[in-house]
Structures are given as C-alpha cells and as structure tokens.
Amino acid sequence: MRVTYLAREAPGAANVQANVNRWQRQLGMPGSSQEEVSQLAKKVMVDGREGYVVDLLGPAGEGQKRILGAMVVEGERVWFFKVMGTAERVGKHKKEFEEFVSSLKLNGPRKETREELSWVTPKGWENGGEKPLRVLTFFAGDKSDPAEVMVTRLRGAQFGDILENINRWRAQVGLGPVTKVEDQPSERIPLAGNSAAYFDFTGPGNEQRPNRRMLLVMSVNNNDVWFFKMIGPQQVIASEKTNFEEFLKSVDVAAAEK
C-alpha cells in the first residue's frame, strides 16, 4: 500500500473526480463523469473527517489489475491511500483496506459542520452561539472589544444590488459611499472551490466605536450567496487577519440535499 499526500491547494488535489480519474488512467481505463464518480466513490468518516473510498477494476483479461483507493482532506493536506495489484490478490484485502482507512487517526484540526458548511475554528476564537439570520458567529481577540466574525447566506434573489451592499458595508466602518463598484478595491481569492470577492474596509467608525475595520468575503455557491465577515477595532482585525484567512481556506460548502 502507498500512502502519499498533496497540498490542498495543488491543482485537483481535493477533487474526488480528478483523483478517481487519475487512478482509472493507471488501470488503462477511461475517466468517469462526475455523476459516475458519485456512484463509484463511497463516502466514509475518517477520524471525524469526510473521506472517499473507491474499488476500481481494470480491463478484463490476463493479469487484470485492481485499485483500492482512498482520499481524506485534513486541513491543508489531502491524504491518499492506494493498493494496486492483480484483481484477485487485491480483492482478498478489500475488507482489511477499508477497516484500515476507517481506523486512521489524523493529527490536524477536526472540521465542524453546520447545514451545508464545514470549517476549522481557529485557535482562540469563541463560538458566539446561534443568532438570527446567521449560520455562524465567533468572537476573536480582546474580550473587552472583540472582533465579531459572522457567516451568513442569502438566496441569490435576496442579495440585491452590489453597489448598495458595498456602500452599506462602508457605512458600517464610517466610510462614505462610492458611486461605482470599481471605486471600492477588492481582490479575488479561492473559497470552497470557487472564486470569491475579498473586501477590506477601514474607516473612522463612530463616536461609540471608533477606528473600525471589516474584512468581508462574498462567494456564490450552489446558487446561494455566502458572506464571511469580520468586523471590529482596527488593531484586533490586524492581529486576527491571518486566522480569518486560514478559516476561509478551511471552508467547504456541500450541495444542499433535496
């Protein structure tokens, strides 16, 4: 058996179809479609993390080959476990292989899940409990005036005009409105397999809460618009920015069950 890993950011590393297709090519088989892979890849839990196991049989004939493969995403790594050999010999060890994969203990932080969202909570962040219209709430930094992290989701039709939203976000840190979307700087970052808009708003705040800063990421996934927002004192946001970005890297959004 071979055990390997790739950085999660490597092209196709965390993509189930890409890895099943790679193993199929090693057997001299054509790659399967996404729908076919969803039938081939058996979902399993590995140390509290979601993984996939496949049993692939190569073209019939003398010396027919077989692969038992598994992949598990752990933080910034994707682990791969593969047994390859003649169909008869590999088949004798299928049960042992699946038991081995299910028994694995991984050292990285465990993902939590709520609704379609899964994530890793950064060290030091406190869960803010359930709040109306939010999927998640956290507090980070100085307890006397912490940064608040919130995750919300809107159906696409509920989002409204992007310029109006940008100006609403700017107002929350004491900034005046802009007349064009292009007047508000932003960058594109990857999030849960999609491209997302990343905004950084820094403003004077107000008399009660001066010197505010907000980091906000907006992503469209499964026809929903997801918002990941951290707002608070400028110095707290600066110290928690790395944690916020690591949190974003850990996020996955699954397709909603019908």
Image (cartoon, helix red, strand yellow):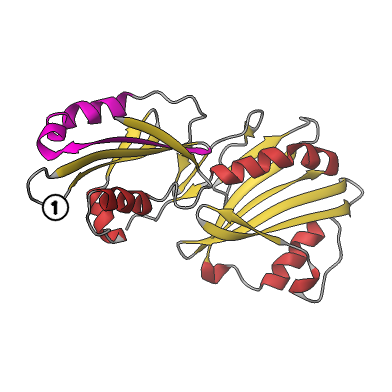
Looking at this view, is 135 or 77 the one in front?
A: 77
Image-based side of 63 in relation to 233, left or right:
left
Which quadrant of the rendered structure holds the N terminus?
A: top left
Q: Which residue is mark 1?
A: 59
- In the image, residue 88 lies in the stretch drawn in magenta: yes
Depicted 125 relative to depicted 155: above or below = above
Q: Position of residue 122 (x, y in %)?
A: 62, 33
Label 1 crowd bin: few (<14), some (14–19), many (20+), radius 10 Å: few
Which quadrant of the rendered structure holds the C terminus?
A: bottom left
Depicted 194 relative to depicted 160: above or below = above
Residue located 46% across and 43% down the image? 114
Q: Name the residue furthest bottom.
A: 179
Image-based side of 29 in relation to 46, left or right:
left
Q: Position of residue 77 (x, y in %)?
A: 49, 37
Residue located 52% across and 68% down the image? 156
Q: Which residues are magenta?
A: 76-103
Q: Quadrant of residue 179?
A: bottom right
Image-based side of 67 in relation to 202, left or right:
left
For label 1, the SS is: loop
Q: Quadrant of residue 172?
A: bottom right
Looking at this view, is 148 or 255 the one in front?
A: 255
Image-based side of 237 in relation to 96, left or right:
right
Amino acid type, residue under disc 1 in the picture: Pro
